[in-house]
């Protein structure tokens, strides 16, 4: 099982400054590259202060310019918000500018507040996503593509420059049955149980494995990535402090994901959670290195190929960097991931 750091920019205090937030994310990417992580992930979200990244491809190019080996994943590019004739060319250029380290995660959008204000309400986002994905694949794979659909109508055109090679596409999907069908279509899969329980994670993994097995040799290269809030702690008091911070983070996340979407001046309002603090503690992976190995072993045994760690939920940057390093040194070697001993001197 490989490991990835989700550069999920969190901006709870405007006085901190967007420039400082993105410097922190870039420093995390350099640290992950230095300590042998397989990849970093970049979200795409607009108009809100959680997962705040309105320019993921620009950031991918910046990361590539300051790292050597790490793969860069868009996690995810929200297709209904873009014109595929523009995005296809931008993806080809980003793939070239990142020295072909780009992996393109795609999704339909998740937050009603964001999607409605960008002109693509969630009620139509699935339909528009499906057509957008078909258009994107056609533009990347063929020349002189024309289209006559509901959301796209255009005469023959060719995206330039042409892709140098295949740009891997990863589908972001949550429901197990949807994971199965997307796997059957030949896509890599990225999912997350969010704050769901262990059985929900197993249902997601089993759905992927079922689809991959049905494809036989054709699905041999497909991968499953799974994301969770993950952080190392050094004592019970430290763990409890970080769990409270994660619980507070989710009081904002839930507001825009499943709640009313109350956002004021770009800042998501924290709302009381239906899930208790104890349930949050049970469902997240915030623990000591030894406990972390035990918690992650079921993921590896179930068949997760890439574990994506969300470490940005309000913890100080110095603690984040320490956790990234400590995880590489004390946890990753148990899963045959590149060990910290291979870290380069910066």
Image (cartoon, rainbow, N blue to C red):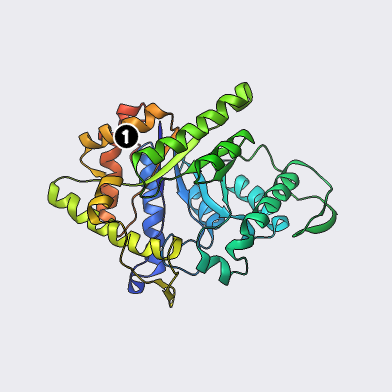
Q: Splitting the image into 4 quarters, where does residue 344 fall?
A: top left
Q: Splitting the image into 4 quarters, where does residue 327 fall?
A: top left
Label 1: how many Cα within 10 Å (few below 14, some 14–19, many 20+): some
Q: Which residue is mark 1?
A: 296
Q: Is residue 181 visible?
A: yes
Residue at the (64%, 36%) spot, across then down = 185
Residue 339, image x, y percentages? 33, 31
Residue 323, image x, y percentages? 27, 46
Q: Is residue 3 visible?
A: no
Looking at this view, is 104 or 120 the one in front? 120
Residue at the (31%, 29%) spot, across then down = 333
Residue 229, image x, y percentages? 34, 48
Check the image and report above or below for 169 versus 279.
above
Horizontal side of residue 12 vs 131, given as left or right: left
The furthest residue to the top: 217
Residue at the (45%, 60%) spot, across then down = 257
Looking at this view, is 80 or 59 the one in front? 80
Check the image and report above or below for 343 versus 318.
above
Horizontal side of residue 191 vs 217, given as left or right: left
Horizontal side of residue 89 vs 321, given as left or right: right
Residue 123, image x, y percentages? 61, 62
């Amino acid at each position: 099982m490989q490991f990835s750091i989700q550069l999920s920019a969190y901006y709870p205090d405007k006085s901190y400054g967007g420039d400082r937030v993105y410097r922190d994310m870039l420093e995390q990417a350099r640290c992950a590259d230095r300590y042998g992580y397989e990849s970093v992930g970049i979200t795409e979200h607009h108009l809100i202060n959680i997962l705040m990244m309105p320019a993921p491809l620009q950031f991918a190019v910046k990361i590539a310019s300051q790292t050597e080996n790490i793969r860069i994943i868009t996690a995810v590019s929200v297709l209904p918000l873009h014109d595929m004739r523009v995005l296809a060319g931008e993806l080809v250029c980003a793939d070239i500018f990142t020295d072909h380290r780009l992996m393109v995660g795609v999704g339909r959008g998740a937050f009603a507040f964001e999607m409605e204000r960008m002109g693509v309400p969630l009620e139509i986002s699935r339909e528009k996503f499906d057509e957008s994905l078909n258009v994107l694949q056609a533009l990347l794979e063929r020349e002189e593509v024309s289209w006559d659909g509901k959301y796209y109508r255009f005469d023959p055109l060719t995206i330039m420059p042409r892709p140098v090679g295949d740009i891997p596409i990863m589908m972001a999907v949550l429901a197990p049955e949807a994971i199965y069908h997307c796997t059957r279509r030949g896509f890599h899969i990225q999912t997350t149980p969010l704050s769901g329980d262990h059985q929900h994670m197993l249902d997601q993994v089993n759905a992927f494995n079922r689809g991959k097995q049905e494809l036989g040799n054709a699905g041999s290269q497909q991968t499953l990535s799974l994301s969770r809030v993950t952080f190392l702690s050094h004592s019970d008091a430290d763990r409890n402090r970080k769990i409270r911070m994660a619980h507070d983070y989710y009081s904002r996340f839930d507001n825009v994901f499943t709640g009313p979407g109350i956002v004021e001046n770009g800042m998501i309002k924290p709302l009381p959670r239906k899930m208790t603090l104890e349930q949050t503690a049970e469902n997240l992976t915030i623990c000591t290195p030894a406990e972390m190995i035990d918690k992650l072993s079921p993921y590896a045994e179930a068949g997760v190929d890439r574990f994506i760690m969300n470490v940005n939920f309000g913890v100080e940057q110095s603690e984040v960097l320490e956790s990234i390093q400590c995880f590489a040194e004390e946890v990753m070697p148990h899963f045959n991931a590149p060990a910290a001993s291979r870290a380069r001197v910066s």
